[in-house]
Image: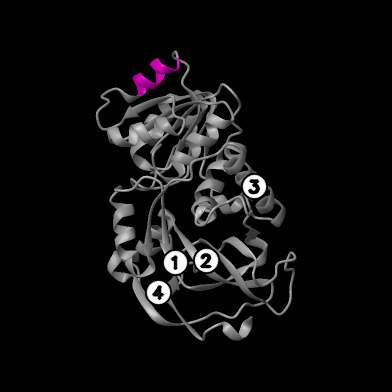
Amino acid sequence: MATSIPKTMSGVLIEKTGGVEVLQYRTDLPVPTPKEGQVLVKNDFIGINYIDTYFRTGLYPSPKPEILGREAEGTIVSLGPSGEMYNFKPGDRVVWMGTSAYAEYTAVPAEKTHIVPSSIGPGIAAASMLQGLTALTLIREAHLVKKGDWVLVHAAAGGVGLWLCQLLKAVGARIIGTASTSEKIELAKKNGAEFMINYKEEKDFVGRVKEITGGQGVIVVFDSTGKDQFENDLEVVARKGSVVSFGNSSGPVPPLAIARLSAKNVKVLRPTLFNYIYTREEFEKYTAELFDFIVKDKLNVRIHHTYPLKDVAKAHTDLEGRATTGKLLLKP
């Protein structure tokens, strides 16, 4: 198998932070060699995530030059020389989480690699991992959502938002979502949101949430937008509730005076997925549960568009322009 692996590959390199112009599509990048505990995967579908834009712009610092991308699905073509391989072998169809996904080949930790069940169609696993696991761990770990709970989901028609709506519906929660257009509102409703608020048109957002919930507010807010809705979040969250801030699409949340939380004994969290799937056991548990939801609950894994790898700049432009609903994929 190893003899068929080329020396060079196509990929997207960035050497400095900035706009989409720093995304360099190259065809002369060296194919990586898997090290201890790694497998080499030939990527078939690569997931694009909002966090990729943070590393590109420098909002999240990372060493440059780098190849962006945190997830992909493909086929194992070789194994590292040593380390725990979890019974993987060349030819296995897998999905993985790690770094350097925007490329034909990636050497990835076997620990963060998972077999794709035959019941999962092409591209679905790559479209599911980061966003689906983010949503699943948010409702299991950041705040354990129970049947009948009132939950507010901002950007409900976005990538993670649609996952949250479907998973929350599957566990029996009552969902209030926000979106900016009538099309996005309809999409979120189709994916499980019971009530939707157009935050561009609603003059009294806090009053509307309290009206919907009979004055009690929501037990948890899942907010990927950052600063724009954070003050509203603190207003609408119920006593002993949680405000879970997990993104910055409108900018980072400013510093918070912690004493403000005592008015309602509120918890504020800023989780990242990777700390919920840190161990192999956690990663396997949540990935298996996610695939189970997809198959048994027939979740709609919405793929907005699959772009050729060379069109990565257009993909980032579309994502940042909020012109998308659901998942963006790249195909080498």
Q: Main secondary structure of the magenta part?
A: helix
Is 282 positioned to the left or the right of 179 in the image? right
Q: Where residue 68 is drawn, which disc sits there?
A: 1
- Inter-mark Cα distance, 1 to 2: 7 Å
Q: CA distance from mark 3 to mark 2?
A: 19 Å
Q: Residue 275, image x and y in percent?
A: 60, 52
Query: Considering only order in the chain, which callout, 2 or 3, is on the residue closer to the N terminus?
Result: 2
The residues colored magenta run: 206-213
- Mark 1 closeness class: few <14, some 14–19, many ≥20 residues within 10 Å: many
Q: Circle 4 is placed at which residue position?
A: 13
Which residue is disc 3 drawn over? 286
x, y (%) of residue 129? 54, 52
One can see residue 304 in this view? yes
Query: Disc 3 residue type?
Result: Tyr
Look at the numbered disc 1 and give the secondary structure of its residue. Answer: loop
| Residue of label 2 | 99
Q: Residues within 10 Å of mark 3 (few under 14, many from 20)?
A: many
Is 230 positioned to the left or the right of 238 in the image? left
- Name above or below for residue 214 compared with residue 205: above
Q: Earlier in the sequence, mark 4 or mark 3?
A: 4
Q: Give the CA separation, mark 3 to mark 1.
A: 24 Å
For residue 207: magenta?
yes
**Neighbour class for label 4 at 10 Å: few (<14), some, many (≥20)?**
many
Is residue 59 visible to the viewer in this orientation of the structure?
no
The amino acid type of the residue labelled 2 equals Thr
Residue sitting nearer the eye, 60 or 41: 41
The amino acid type of the residue labelled 4 equals Leu
Q: CA distance from mark 4 to mark 3?
A: 31 Å
